[in-house]
Image (cartoon, rainbow, N blue to C red):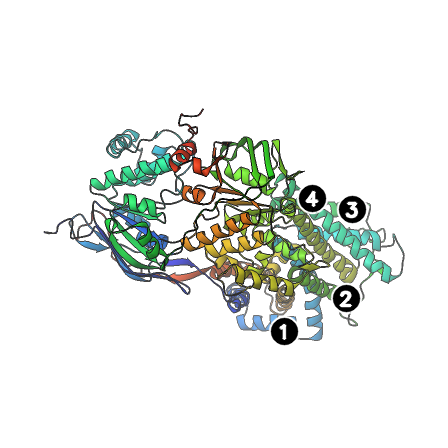
Amino acid sequence: MPETETVHPLLSLQNITKIFGDLVANGNVNLDLHAGEIVALLGENGAGKTTLMNILFGHYVADEGRVMVRTSSGTLVDLEPGAPQAALEAGIGMVHQHFTLAENLTGLENIVLGTESLFARKFSRSKARAKLQELMQSSGLEVDLDLRVSKLAVGERQRVEILKALYRDARILVLDEPTAVLTPQESDSLFNTLKLLAAKGMAIIFISHKMAEVLGASDRVAVLRGGRIVADLPTSQCDRHKLAELMVGHAVQMAEREPGNPGEEILVFKGVSAGEGRELIENVNLSLRKGEIIGLAGVSGNGQSMLAKVLSGLEEPTAGAVTLGSQPLKANAAAAIQSGVARIPEDRHHDGIVGAMSVEENLVLEEIRKPAYQRFGLLRFNEIRKRAQEAIKAYDIRCSGPLAVSRLLSGGNIQKIVLARTLDQEPAIVLAAQPSRGLDVGATADVHRRLQEARDRGAGVLLISEDLDELFQLSDRIAVIHRGHVSEPMASEELDKKQVGLMMAGHSAKGEQAA
Amino acid sequence: MIRFEPRTNVSSLFALALPIVAGITALALAAIPIAAAGGEVFAAYGHIFKGAFGSKFAFSELLARATPLIFTGLAVSVAFRAKLWNIGAEGQLYVGALAAVAIGSGAISAPSYIMIPLIMLAGMIAGGTLMLVPTLLKTRLGADEVVTTLLLNFVVLLFVQMMLEGPMKDPMGMGWPQSEPMTSAATLPKMMARMRVHWGLVIALVSALVIYIMMKRSVWGFEIRATGENVSAAKHAGIPVTSTFIKVGLISGALAGLAGVSEVAGLKGYLTADISPGFGYTGIVVAMLAGLSPLGVVIAAIFIAAVFVGADSMSRAMGVSSYIADLIVALSLICVLISSLFVRFKVRFVNPKKTKLTAKGDA
């Protein structure tokens, strides 16, 4: 058929609608994808990006609309809904945010997994290896295929995932938040690869909520808001402000950094070691003063979780000591709260809230034994309700009321519950671990404002983050954690993002490779 | 093709209706084996109903049967709420009964207003202590309490048999392996003359109320629920998770122990090794049917007791084996487990005959 590449899309999503209960996750979404282009799917959390991609890949079935793929003869055909196998066969490859690799198998085994017939008498490693060798060369995705995946770094695992898609002759590559776990340098290299693949005629679509990478790497941007496509335009016609406005729906005021007013030391880590492996920290020395924010930069899995656990009172250091003011910190969560450490956990769904319990119960979770909320061991419902209503108002927690089931709230609102619960206790120290991870622009701004307010009130804030923009925007000093070692904090004015990025990858502050 | 899609919210009416539907389904499914055994199906249901509710005597039997089930159902529901999987209510029942007999069959003589609280306390301590072992093994060593509680049942049962054949054997028992009878001061009085239902029922109902209030209104209940729903968030929020598990283990074991006390002191009057036809295990069904709600346990226990008592009478009238009752109870559990799937997922029927596309499949 006389159709040309440019006019006719390789993939066409038509009028996709998906409704969960009362929530329109996707409403009438139309999106075309052509060979050779990189499309960024931009949107806040909960905008429906992942739902859309899951429909495309057959994990969900759309309530309405169709997913059409062009066959090799050039006609558009409906893709069988709800069948990932059909999507794979149609040449759609998906790289999930959380990798789907078997850790106990090698890269090669992971890649061929599922491609060999169950009844084949033996599988020809050499043939697979030859094909992969060729793919690695042409795409620049170098990785040791004979190492077990558990031994691979995160960036390498992602390369295995992409190779897996290429090995199955994917023509369309979908990546869900591909840079979430990468260092800035790894992200750059990923986008170079993607550009190379697109130049060879692949169609690529990646999900993101980071504007910088969308502007840097895509040819076209589709912005989702509230489940609908609100803009679909060439990247060349966009800038940061325009995209932010499209994503949120109104102009956004970004918090500006104001220098803090540091006072005396209130938290000292002295030679602290704990944990092992990816959770190791070794000989950490750090001192936090009143009224300052120290940003701790690092790629996840470099020990920041363990550092947070130690400060949260959940883990006992194997060596060294943590001192709060003049008191040693006890390895007991209740004691940590008692001594004024507010903890905003990294994984708010897992550690922050009890999803099945109500908003009001979660708001008093840490303080339930205080006389304010119980008398003779019996709960004071009126007081709890009053507290919840106050917090819901003060923190603008969007929910149907104090009795709403917390699990059903959005990530931003769940984080607000955690903030209200911890910050309203007027803590001396705030530990904020990845406080804006997965939050939309508005909720992120809110978190930042609250942290700054806590600092201005005189609290010392330890902000653990992978997001360099966030760190530079908030921190008075920045330290970097790499393989469990924490660098000496430096004033943020004296650092730039590139330097910190290199330190996150294991180089010293001056640029040479550390041991 | 059938598809399961997660539900975002569940109406409480729907959640309430499910165990009822599950119970009815289980009864309906029992028609198959009844018919296979040569019974007239509708007549059989009639006999079951009449056997359970048809007379004052039948109803008294039903309540007597429900009493231990309320205790064991409560024991299981409290434990399961904290995700402490206590499968050992059976063993805890027996040690509770053993403790009651040890104290109440003549070792101490005191008026009944002292004896009855005393044997109850002894039974609770015995059951709680027995459950403490797997709980500590779980919190200290991470041992799976499903396995440890289950296996302890057999240990306890053999221990009870040993005691009944040996040191605690009734010398007046004509050689039967049974304990000496409870003294009259240590006996729970009957609630009605010539009927078997006894004051253990009232103790069971009060226990249900106390547990309900504890779970709903107390700090303990709050902490138990938080621990059960998300142990890591509870730990993070400073809730003493380990001591919560220990508390739950003690309360759960104590409740199951009370079932044993109530059986020897209220119904049998002495201990034998077959005092419980699996009340501990049936308690799991009761708790699941009740959706782990303490007040729901009372209703579920009455339902299960009605099935047992009714099926006994049906089997006498029609010659169909009373094993039908066990079958219905087992079916109820299966139905309730399946129905919990419907609470969490919406089921959709999808037409599989849709155009299938392959990469090579040219149109």
Query: Both on one chain, marks 4 and 3?
Result: yes
Question: Are marks 3 and 2 in one subunit?
Answer: yes
Q: Residue under label 4, please give it.
A: B133
- Please identify, in this view, whether the residue under mark 3 or under mark 2 is nearer the observer: 2
Counting residues from the start of the chain, the first of labels 2 and 4 encountered is: 4
Nearest the eye: B209 or A316: A316
Q: Position of residue A185 (x, y in %)?
A: 35, 35
Task: First in sequence, mark 1 or 2: give its number.
Answer: 1
Residue A265 versus residue B210 in the image, above or below: above
Q: Residues within 10 Å of mark 1 (few under 14, many from 20)?
A: some
- Closer to the observer: label 1 or label 4? 4
Whole-angstrom CA distance, mark 1 to mark 2, is 24 Å
Q: Amino acid at mark 3?
A: Met
Taking the spot 22% from the left edge, 46% from the top edge, the residue there is A37
Question: What residue would you read off at disc 3?
Answer: B163
Label 4 secondary element: helix
Choose mark 4 or mark 3, whichever is in front: 4
- Which chain is home to disc 2? B
* Residue named by callout 1: B50
Horizontal relation, residue A445 to residue A137: left or right: right
Q: Bin the neighbour count of mark 2 within 10 Å (Cα to Cα): few under 14, some 14-19, many 20 and up.
A: many
